[in-house]
Image (cartoon, rainbow, N blue to C red):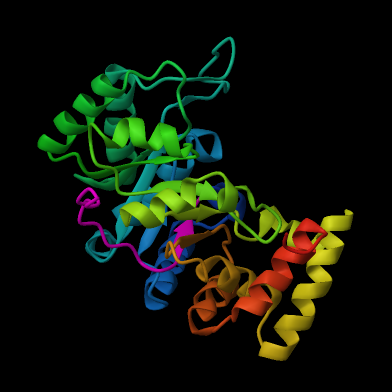
Amino acid sequence: MQPTPRPDLTLSPIVAGLWRIRDWNLDVAGRVRWIEQALELGITCFDHADIYGDYQAEVLFGEALQAAPALRRRMQLITKCGIRLRSANRPYRVNYYDTSAAYVRAQVEQSLRKLHTEQLDLVLIHRPDYLMDAAALADTFTTLSREGKVAHWGVSNHSASQFALLDARHPLATNQVELSPMQLDALDDGTLDQAQQLGARPMIWSPLAGGRLFSGEDEQAVRVRAEMQSIAERLGVSLATLAYAWVLRHPSRPHPITGTGRVAGLHEAVAALDVSLDAEDWYAIWTASKGHSVP
């Protein structure tokens, strides 16, 4: 079988995640400088979602772009939509998903305004919507792309079958999934197999296991940290760099997403691009995570 032609989208090897930008407490000038430093490291992709920071993350990043508009030409802007998250200004009865044409359009146009840009480079459907009409959503993708508002489309946290359902109607650029030395599901659930089959490079969120890698006290975290510290010392890298290298070692050629406002943390992620992790070390970390050897 010939693979479906993929959208022609190029992302930087490491992607900067903006989920916690509101917690970084940077003023506009500080945000501009942080973006500049990320770009200097070769990180040109910035990952958002409409709901991040209680719907304020895009606003904070957009203020920086408004203050330094030349930066927009040097980056790719990624955002997500599809979750109606309860907040003070959105008093939904429950959190729920919405991939209707009206809602997706409204959120895309809102993201364009907040980020002070005329086009979004990549928009992802944030979570699988059980009520998704794949044909209608694909039509929405086509219409918004024709209008020049979105260059590429993808999904996040979708199973292989959910990805295939939508991809058959509108080719998708990526599936953003969770993977880390302590979260291995993507290795077995078919999503990374599918990514490799289609040549649709995945994006990886929480590659540091949400900080559990450094401070977790559960048995799995203790095992993984001990094994990784030994390997990291031998390779002369930090624990974080090794975690990124472990993710990057997968043949689907994933793009890990950082979650840090520390420039030093961005350096640790980029340093992983120069780490050559052999199969034995990769499986030693897998074994420590699972608590048993391979079958």
Query: How far from the left and from the top, in percent, is residue 226?
Result: 83, 73
Q: Nearer the viewer, residue 185 or 155?
A: 185
Q: Pick the quarter of the image with the C terminus.
A: bottom right
Q: Residue furthest left?
A: 146
Query: How far from the left and from the top, in percent, is residue 56?
Result: 48, 38
Which residue occupies 54% across, 84% down? 276
- Indicate whether residue 61 is drawn in magenta: no
Q: Quadrant of residue 75?
A: bottom left
Q: Residue furthest top?
A: 93
Q: Nearer the viewer, residue 261 or 28?
A: 261
Q: Which residues are magenta?
A: 1-18
Q: In the figure, is residue 263 to the left or right of 60?
A: right
Q: In the figure, is residue 32 to the left or right of 92?
A: left
Which residue occupies 79% across, 82% down? 230
Q: Quadrant of residue 220?
A: bottom right
Judge whether residue 214 can be spotted in this image. no
Q: In the figure, is residue 26 to the left or right of 282?
A: left
Query: How far from the left and from the top, in percent, is residue 45?
Result: 37, 60
**In the image, is residue 243 above or below residue 145?**
below
